[in-house]
Amino acid sequence: MFGVEQQAVKGRGEAVIETAFATAAGQVTQLSWDQAAATVRFEDLAPVSAFPVVPGRRWGPGWWWSATTGRHVVHGSAAMRTQLMVLDRDPDVTGLSARPVRLLWRDMSDGRVRSWVPQLFARHADGTGLLADCPSSPTTGGDRAQRARMVLEAACARVGWAYRRLEPPPTVVAANLRWLAGYRHPRNQGPPGIGAALAEVFAAPRPLADGAAAVGDPLQVLPAVYHALWCGHLTTSLDEPLHEEALICADAERSGEGVEKRLGAGGGQGRGECGGRHTR
């Protein structure tokens, strides 16, 4: 299974890394890591191994519909679904996939072949990649995960990529993102012209409910507001619970001002519970 057993280390003392992945035709293929990173579209690959179904566990494998790709991405845990949500909203991410590749190397300490399947792959707009795992806590995976982390960090750095063990976002931020993610589908963007109307109404920071009512019937406008917040066309602080008095403003990059500066100029946000005062 490990195609370079006769070669334990490179000239710089780095472990030789091989990859195994399934092609679109379902055929398992093996390439050197450097070659695969340069030529394989990992964002288009199916999982190289399935997520296990563990009897008695409250959470099982599921699917996340990606607004980035228009396709579903499988996930195996609540922590992984949360990280998929975060990456799906990142404007720098152009592709997402789950467990698309297995990395194999020979452990120089004992000569044994080791392997690791990162949970997520993300492609960035500049063509670089991110391999990531989504631990529910820093100690998840134990020593094996920490040994794999060091190998994967070095391998990714060598090709200009990154490997990370992603930390869960703060509770309030995650709750706000989950709410906005419910409106990520383009069907929520509203009728033609509503995007321009929202940009005009929220040109200066304005309470969410007040601005939505200024555009039209809130029952029709609010989904478009939440969709615009998901897409980044509108912005707000996600560190506070999202509610009807939350200050919203149009994308700060278009006006050349910072988000914090514009929101701060509009005064403090009102208080409320996320979801408790929404119309959905």
Image (cartoon, helix red, strand yellow):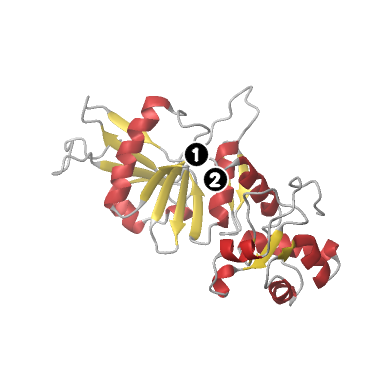
Compare residues 115 and 257 and report the one nearer the observer: 257
Residue 198, given in percent of the width and then of the height, sits at 72, 71
Residue 104, given in percent of the width and then of the height, sits at 31, 37
Label 1: which residue? 134
Q: Are marks 2 and 1 in contact (CB under 8 Å)?
A: yes
Residue 242, given in percent of the width and then of the height, sits at 71, 52
Per the image, label 2 sits on a secondary structure element best described as helix
Residue at 71% x, 66% y is: 189
- Residue type, numbered disc 2: Gln
- Residue type, numbered disc 1: Cys
Compare residues 219 and 189 and report the one nearer the observer: 219
Q: CA distance from mark 2 to mark 1?
A: 7 Å
Would residue 155 be found to the left or right of residue 94 on screen?
left
Per the rendering, the mark at residue 36 is none
Q: Quadrant of residue 259?
A: bottom right
Per the image, label 1 sits on a secondary structure element best described as loop
Label 2: which residue? 83
